[in-house]
Each structure stands twice: as structure tokens, then as C-alpha cells.
Amino acid sequence: MNEFLSFAAVVVGIFISFAMYTTLYGRPNPLRSWAEFSYLGAGTGVSVVIGLTYIWNTAVLGIQAGDWILIFSIILGLMMLFRVHPTYGYISRLPLAFTVGTGLALSLRTQIFTSFIRQINATIVKLWTNVPLDFLYRVTIAVSVLTILTFFLYTMELSGPLFWTSRVGEYLMYIGFGAIFAQTFMGRLGLFIGYMESLTTPTWKTPYTVGSALICLIAAILFERTGLGEKLSAG
């Protein structure tokens, strides 16, 4: 029974994956809507179960162990539920403000070191080194930082040398943004390739993968040709 459930979960997961990919066809169809709603419903259910398990293991068992301060966390959590009430929704502002303020304080402390101080420390280094490649890297970093900073001098007219350094900094930012975009795209492409490999490994998944892809593609074409896609998706 467990083996059959595992097999069924894999096959249904493969079909839902390609049903969601029918959104790339560019036309609405009920397969895509069904896959999206199934994914959202399953994700919501898993999140609720994980959240309740965490509350039980952390708060309830903690209170039973004598950590009475956790009672306030349960009270604040229950106050958040008033968010859905039209009359007493203002009660949820207190726990939300407490959570946002605490999270902001904790993240701000780490951001000061990781995104500000350590970035400056990594930039201010001696240029000369006996390794030619390291010397090239350090010079590139120094030139890039100085020229890009001149691009953001909005309180004075950029003329003469500042005009050319700001222009160089502008093009360096273009290069940096392009590299970030390319890295993001390659990362997403790598995730897609890895997921496609998981749908064909082991080899017994391959027929179900190919069959699901063909069924979803044919269904998307038929829904578009017959006009049922927009009607069923809207309904």
C-alpha cells in the first residue's frame, strides 16, 4: 500500500508539473488552474501542519516544561487571528507591530555587519600584491567603487573629470547588473534542468513524464481551438 501511494504521488506530481507548465502556451486552460489551485491548497495544508507542529513542540511543550514566558507568545499569536474580523481587526496590530519591530531589529543588526561594514572592509585593501591576478582584481574593485560613487554625486554638476568618471561608473553598473541578471537566469535554468532530471530518474519515470507532457500539450491546444479554455478557466 505504501509503495502504491508513493508511486501515485510521483505520477500525479509529474502530471501537475506539466499542467502548470501549460501557462507557457500563453492561453488560459483549466489544467493550469487546477494545477495551481492544487499546489496552493497542498502548500497551505503543509504550512498549517508544520506551523501547528512547531507551536506544539515549542510553545505547548515549553510551557509544560516550566517556560511560562511562552504564554505571551501564544496570546500574541491568538491576537493575530483578529485580523480577519471586520470590527476587532485593530487588535491584531499589536502583535504585528511587535513581530515586525523585533524582526527589523534583529535583521538590522546583521545587515550592518554583512551589507555595510564587511563590504567596506572587503573594499579597502592594499592594491599591490605579488600575484598578478589578485592585483588586477583589487585594482578593478578600487576603480569600480570610485567611479560608481561619482555617478551618485547629485549635489554638484558633473563636469570635467567627474563627468568621465561618472560615465565609466554608469557603464560598470550596467556590466554588474547584466552579470547579476545572467547569474540569476543561469541559476533558474539550473533548477529547471535539475527538476527535469528528477522527472526522468530513475528511468521508469520517463514514460510517465513524456506521456504527461504530451497530454498537457494536446489538451492546451484543444482548449484553445475549441474556446473551452477561457470558458472553463473563467468559470
Image (cartoon, rainbow, N blue to C red):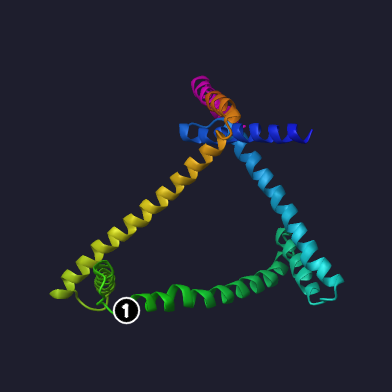
The vertical placement of 139 against 48, above or below, is below
In this view, the residue farthest toward the left is: 160
Q: Is residue 28 visible?
A: yes
In the rendered structure, which amino acid carries the disc numbered 1?
Val
Q: Secondary structure at mark 1?
A: loop
Q: Is residue 30 visible?
A: no
Find out whether residue 229 is within the magenta segment. Answer: yes
Find out whether residue 76 is within the magenta segment. Answer: no
How far from the left and from the top, in percent, is residue 19?
57, 32
Q: Nearer the viewer, residue 41 or 137?
A: 137
How far from the left and from the top, in percent, is residue 63?
84, 72
Say which quadrant the N terminus sits in.
top right
Q: Nearer the viewer, residue 10 or 129?
A: 129
- In terms of image quadrants, where is residue 161? bottom left
Residue range of the region highlighted in magenta in the rendering: 216-235
Q: Main secondary structure of the magenta part?
A: helix
Q: Nearer the viewer, residue 153 or 203?
A: 203
Q: Residues within 10 Å of mark 1 (few under 14, many from 20)?
A: few
> Relative to residue 130, is residue 188 drawn left or right?
right
The residue wearing badge 1 is: 125
How far from the left and from the top, in percent, is residue 42?
68, 44
Q: Residue at x 79, y 68 (%)?
A: 59
> Relative to residue 225, is residue 69 drawn left or right?
right
Q: Tag count in the figure?
A: 1
- In terms of image quadrants, where is residue 78? bottom right
> Relative to residue 80, is residue 135 drawn left or right?
left
